[in-house]
Image (cartoon, rainbow, N blue to C red):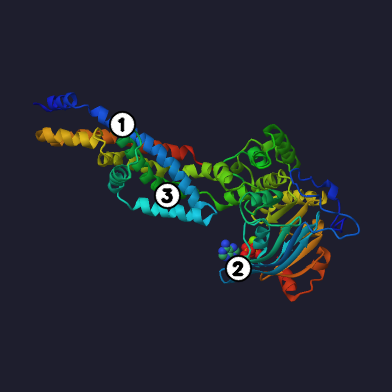
Amino acid sequence: MTTEQTPEHAPEQTPAPSTSPSPAPSTSQDAPARPLVHLARVNKHFGSLHVLRDIDLDVAKGEVVVVIGPSGSGKSTLCRAINRLETIDDGVIELDGKPLPAEGKELARLRSDVGMVFQSFNLFAHRSILENVTLGPIKVRKVKPKEAKEQAMALLERVGVASQADKMPAQLSGGQQQRVAIARALAMRPKVILFDEPTSALDPEMVNEVLDVMVALAKEGMTMIVVTHEMGFARKAADRVVFMSDGQIVEQADPESFFTNPQSGRARDFLGKILTH
Amino acid sequence: MSLFEQIGFLFTSYDIPAAFWVNIQLSFWAAIGALVIGTVLGLMRVSPVPSLRWLGTSYVTLLRNTPLTVIMLFLVLGVWGQLKIELAPDFNTNFFLFAIVGLAIYHAAFVCEAVRSGINTVPLGQAEAARAIGLSFLPAARLVLLPQAVRGAVAPLGNVLIALIKNSTVAAAASVATETSSVMKTMIEFNGNMTVLIFMIFALGYVILVVPIGLLTTWGSRRLAVSR
Ligand SMILES: Nc1ncnc2c1ncn2[C@@H]1O[C@H](COP(=O)(O)OP(=O)(O)OP(=O)(O)O)[C@@H](O)[C@H]1O
Ligand SMILES: [Mg+2]
């Protein structure tokens, strides 16, 4: 059961982005807080395939949103559009009140504020575990190597792989690699982290070690958008479940209501299929 | 004359090692130029900027499909002869430099393809992860893509280098008269009875130059393997 239901919980524990010139997002009680991630009428085609249809989605600071839906419904595309690994045809995507820049330096800066954890980990294969985590801080944030190393070791400690720091990615298990990937994302002190099916490439016995790290992150107030079919994670950590089908957001609700009482036929269908497994 | 005496005669009458040294120097500088230009072109071809991609593709299509002799003649007759662009005041140095330029810009097109095929061996996820932590194109290429691309590019780069060394004889078209094929022609002109022997001396010389490169690239691509 979630202990905190409000989207605005525990923002003070989120690591403050050190280099962002933007004013701190307002969290005053009278005005509704500006969403950290804002999507409005987002559309995307792959050729004739309409993969995102009029997507509207707001994610508040500190909120954990789980995106769920059948294969091919556009979940990955949605995730990738938020840090512009995928371009969109029309609509608006804003991060912290600013629209996504098109290309170049500005886009790179935006991406450094949006963490991404991939299904296939994508650790830099030619760099050690420690270097995987320090590369971004040193090269993008211009943190001093010594300081970056200390921070990286602390993060690796936190995700439980500090003892592997000097190994190469290929020497680690999938679960360990994914935890390193989470540490790599955290090292940038992102405003939000996107997870695209972070546990679906893992052997079953390694799923929980990764989910535990993610649940801890959620409890600490990190803003997270997580594509996953792990209902246990959704129940434990999510503030909201967003159900996608055929490129549309069909319904969204808190995890308990969504899993026990889905409103749409498509969601009932889908839940019926994954629950029988 | 016995065969032994003939060889002795040829090596004392002509400075054959010096001729090879000219080709080695041409090849060395041209290889560096081709590597630099070709890498830049390879990056242009995978860059997110459409006009740069177009420029890279056009360069490769144009230079790769033009015979090297034509490029050399164009540089000497067109760029130097008609446009009066001079690379060095000294006549011989000037032609030597033009030959290096011709070899470099021609082989750069092939280096570009080798670099690109190397980059294509790096899984897409590596570039995406690099972009996701906020590296822009050039830092991502330098820190993540190219180090992993080298492995896949070494063997094709070795082939380009081998071709370049052999093609350095085309410098004759740029009036570099001291290089091997020009010296060989002179030798044959004056010693027609030893033609076969002369050919064999030069062929062997190139084999000795080129074979180690093949061995080196095979060793290199094994050494540089990145485990996934
Ligand atoms: N680069 C691409 N080019 C063409 N079509 C694509 C591309 N990427 C995705 N698609 C298509 O777009 C649709 C949505 O894909 P997406 O990966 O977003 O779905 P998903 O919900 O993440 O599915 P899954 O659960 O299988 O990961 C699919 O039909 C897919 O085949
Ligand atoms: Mg997907």
| Among the two numbered marks 1 and 3 on one chain, the one whose residue lies closer to the N terminus | 1
Separation of residues labelled 2 and 3 (CA atoms): 31 Å
Q: Which mark is residue B134?
A: none
- Give the percent coordinates (x, y) of residue A134: 67, 39
Q: Position of residue A250 (x, y in %)?
A: 74, 71
Residue identified by numbered label 1: B90
Q: What secondary structure is found at the residue carrying circle 3?
A: helix
Chain name for mark 3:
B
Q: Relative to B3, is A101 on the left or the right?
A: right
Q: Quadrant of residue A148?
A: top right
Residue at 28% x, 33% y is B91
Q: Which residue is mark 3?
A: B113
**Image x and y of residue B98, in percent:** 33, 39
Q: Foreground residue, B218 or A206?
A: B218
Relative to residue A264, is residue B188 depicted above or below?
A: above
Task: Tell me whether the residue at label 1 lies in contact with that at label 2, contact meaning CB atoms closer than 8 angstroms.
Answer: no
Q: Are marks 2 and 3 in contact (CB under 8 Å)?
A: no
Query: Looking at the image, which is closer to me, B72 or A3?
Result: B72
In the image, A125: left or right of A150? left
Q: Nearer the viewer, residue A266 or B70?
A: B70
Mark in the foreground, 1 or 3: 1
Q: Is residue B197 visible?
A: no
Same-chain status of marks 1 and 2: no
Does A24 sit above or below residue B158? below
In the image: residue B70, left or right of residue A239 = left
Disc 1 chain ID: B
